[in-house]
Image: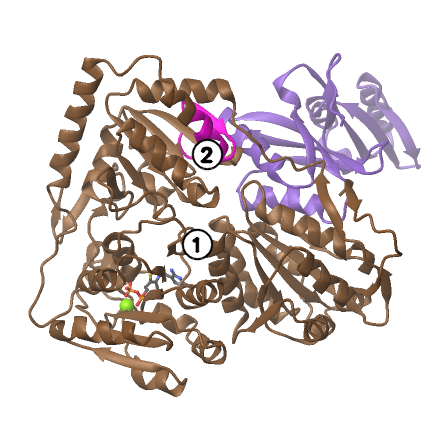
Amino acid sequence: MNDKETPNNSSSDPELLSGGDALVRALQEEGVEKIFGYPGGAVLHIYDALFRQNLIEHYLVRHEQAATHMADGYARATGRPGVVLVTSGPGATNAITGIATAYMDSIPMVVISGQVQSHLIGTDSFQETDMVGISRPIVKHSFLVKHASEIPATIKKAFYLASSGRPGPVVVDIPKDITNPADLHPFLYPESVAIRSYNPAQRGHSGQIKKAAAMLMAAERPMIYSGGGVIQGEASELLKAIVTALGYPITSTLMGLGAFPATDAQFLGMLGMHGTVEANNAMHHCDVLLAVGARFDDRVTNTVSKFCPYAKIIHIDIDPTSISKNVAVDVPIVGPVSSVLTEMLAVIQNRPEPPTQDQTAALSDWWSQIEGWRAQNCLAYETDENLIKPQQAVQAVYELTKGQAYVSSDVGQHQMFAALYYPFDFPRQWINSGGLGTMGFGLPAAMGVQVAFPEAQVVCITGEGSIQMNIQELSTCSQYELPVKIINLNNRALGMVRQWQDMQYEGRHSHSYMDSIPDFKGLVEAYGHVGLSIKTPGDLRPGLEEAFSQKDRLVFVDIEVDPNEHVYPMHVAPNGSMRDMWLKKGVRT
Amino acid sequence: MIRRIISILLENEAGALSRVVGLFAQRNYNIESLTVAPTEDESLSRLTLTTSASDIEVEQITKQLNKLVEVVKLADLTEGDHVERELMLVKVKASGAQRAEVKRVSDIFRGQIVDVTSSTYAIQLSGTSDKLDAFIGALSESVVLEVVRTGVTGLSRGEKVLTL
Ligand SMILES: Cc1ncc(C[n+]2csc(CCOP(=O)(O)OP(=O)(O)O)c2C)c(N)n1
Ligand SMILES: [Mg+2]
């Protein structure tokens, strides 16, 4: 791609390595410690190279999708790119869902896929699939390696692309002959890389930042809306400093939870389709909105034409395509969140005049209005003597883990209950497939987090539907002794589907039943883990206490929850604005 | 919806073109014509495409194109004064009385006859797409046997250039 690489200045002649060894060496040069994968014909040379070294630890999954989610969870928890190794054909196609999941949430990932031998490409040969083609719309970039000598530079570029700018997955497809052990090439790992056609913004436009800061400081009904970009951009502390300095309310997207402490009084809870009354109303009524590392997703805005009708909008994002894609903004700032917020904080701290009395009064009126919405206590729910409410189960998990656990989730009602009832105080603590909404993500992602932080408490809050999409990974957990705690909010239903059917299809539960649910306790025991089954509210806390007391074991807690519970609040759709919400069954704003 | 001509400098690499075309399909943008060839700098291709889009849409399209790693630079030629050309070859039936008539129409449009048989002419014509359309319209339909067009290519007028 026409770029300049500076090779290591070593006086001796470069070592001669095969493509397979060169690949493994390149990964070592990138500081890769863990990779997640599954072998097959096209990657046997690479697996042999892995066998002959001990710097990189390989985790063998039971399905390639899980390898991508494990790498993804590892990346979300650490901020470092997750690395995946799969074979050609079915190995590669199995990885697709996980690549798309990472792409939608801008997660840095490098996926190495084996390919059939170069001379067989295009002949429909055994286990051939056009990986570069099939993954094209869901990768940040991809490479098909044409010659073994290209491996070092290609890997260098792959890691650079995956982790710089707006991060994302990069696929490196390597035909088998390229890794041939008999074919040796000089190994020189480039020290730096520059790609002439790729120059992500290094800082925001100072004029725009000043303008934005002035607009924010002059606001009467300000609101801050933060997203996953704040976490990816390592800007949580800066965000905290700005929000505290301004004394303004803040909300977060599903992806941004944890960037700002949820237990802080300035935090109004999550916004969007299942956002809180106070967050969604404050969005609707604000006069200045600061969006940071968020992308105005349709699960946030509800009807776009009714979105924030009174607001001037400031939008900070590293990706120019995110700006004015869904919602037109008044002050766009393209740049890394951390550098933009650093500059913005300086402007705010050197504010020429303190807020006027009128401004202070307006802000205090705004807060009273917000407290009024907050007092509606939209997350309250009715408990039942005989049935465990899913909300109750999540709250118990929160209390017993003292709010300190890494929590992964799948997709469905349980995911929303986790997001709403487990307040996240730290960035990277909440590990969730927000953009693609991938059922089956939760367990392998939790495993990736546990691999990254063996001592940490890692909880996967899942549903009986989602967990069965990658349940085979319980076997991987036995192999590597990953003591993840799985909290299965078992409502005997594809609950979120069922909720929509209740609300929009007059309760016709078309295929949202799970009629033949396994005996989870027995199943996890067969995999060598501890299974617990909790059926009554009285057993909830003692059961969970027992689960969390087993520090070194994977414990699967199957909790029978009320199958008729819905997630509220919920946006009224279609044609609703952000403040139009269902508050409970049959009751709306 | 306005017709746009977007001109792109692209890394001359395998797979780069498919990313551009794939982007249009994936994001539901339309491509009306597309032309691509290497430039004098053989590491680069120049790709010209036409699409119909509103101002807001074309802003997204150009940003999304720029986001492709292999796109080095691009310009929306329709934003300013520009020259655009398309080349067309038309094979027409040319026998009997038609023969003279076809030749006459071709001359009016400054076409060149590039192949002749006893019953056909192949005419080469270049100009704006409108002019090529008008030429086809001027030939009575029954005589047109085959039409091939290159798609639009173009550049900005004056000093403005799209180079590295
Ligand atoms: C792979 C995949 N297929 C289908 C869906 C659509 N979907 C969203 S939520 C849901 C139900 C999930 O059921 P469960 O895991 O039991 O969670 P619950 O809603 O019951 O808490 C389905 C089918 C999806 N998000 N992902
Ligand atoms: Mg369920």
Q: Amino acid at mark 1?
A: Leu
Q: In the image, which disc is placed on residue A248?
A: none
Residue in the image at 41% along x and 68% along y: A443
Q: Is mark 2 within 8 Å of ligand 1?
A: no
Q: Is mark 1 within 8 Å of ligand 1?
A: no
Q: Position of residue A491 (x, y in %)?
A: 23, 70
| Chain seen in brown | A
In the rendered structure, the answer to whether residue A24 lies left or right of residue B23 reads: right
In the rendered structure, the answer to whether residue A486 lies left or right of residue A266 reads: right
Q: Position of residue B55 (x, y in %)?
A: 51, 24
Q: In the image, which disc is placed on residue A325?
A: 2
How crowded is the residue under tag 2: few (<14 C-alpha within 10 Å), some, or many (20+)?
Answer: some
Q: Looking at this view, is A256 or B83 the one in front?
A: A256
Can you name the residue that lies furthest to the front here? A11
Q: Amino acid at mark 2?
A: Lys
Q: Secondary structure at mark 2?
A: loop
Q: Position of residue A411 (x, y in %)?
A: 35, 60
Q: In the image, which disc is placed on residue A436?
A: 1
The tint chain B carries is purple
